[in-house]
Amino acid sequence: MSRIDLLPGAGPVLTLRQALYRAGRDYHGGITRLAFDMGLEVDALQKKLHHADDRRWPTPDELEEIVQWTADPRLLDALVRPAGAVWYRPKPVPATNDALQAVAKLLAESGQFVGSLHDGASDNVWTLPEVLNLEQRGMEVIRQVLAIMAGAREAMEDASHG
């Protein structure tokens, strides 16, 4: 496996090809370990995950396994973004005052971000990077709120069964 990162400094919003590369590279043990875990030849998987080679792609079954093994949020974002969907991994967090304050802080930061975009887009012209960044922040807020909701439900069910 190459120790040189061929996609340095990629932002938070990645294309599917970039997200596949990053998911494989950042997997514990890298692409070599991912290939071993998937039962594939390392060279074959490296070629399929290379971010600049659009001639080779993982098969649908391999893509499913890559998602399963890596569970990389950037890859999940890249997969569902074209459909305008938001993914959510059920991971309840305690619905405590601290958790709610964290969501409030995230909402405030997102509001400031949207406000800064409004200044730049006062002529109603949005650029692709602005829209992608806005969508990414919105998805983060949605996931955190859903996690707190799941935590509240879990706490309620534990109390009624305990």
Image (cartoon, rainbow, N blue to C red):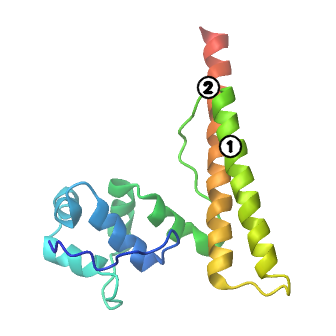
Q: CA distance from mark 2 to mark 1?
A: 18 Å
- Marks 2 and 1: which is nearer the front? 1
Residue 143 location (% of width, % of height): 62, 49
| Labelled disc at residue 3 | none
Residue 9 location (% of width, % of height): 40, 74
Taking 114 as reference, is 72 left or right?
Answer: left
* Kind of residue indicated by mark 1: Val
Measured along the vertical axis of the image, is residue 88 above or below residue 151?
below
| Labelled disc at residue 154 | 2
Total tally of numbered discs in the picture: 2
Query: Dot 2: what SS?
Result: helix
Measured along the vertical axis of the image, is residue 54 above or below residue 151?
below
Q: Which residue is mark 1?
A: 103
Residue 84 falls in which quadrant of the image? bottom right
Measured along the vertical axis of the image, is residue 101 above or below residue 66?
above
Residue 141 location (% of width, % of height): 67, 52
Residue 68 appears in view: yes
Identity of the residue furthest to the right in this view: 123
Report the residue at 19% width, 64% height from top. Answer: 35
Residue 136 location (% of width, % of height): 61, 65
Instruction: Identify which residue, 162 or 10, lies in the foreground.
Output: 10
Identity of the residue furthest to the bottom in this view: 55
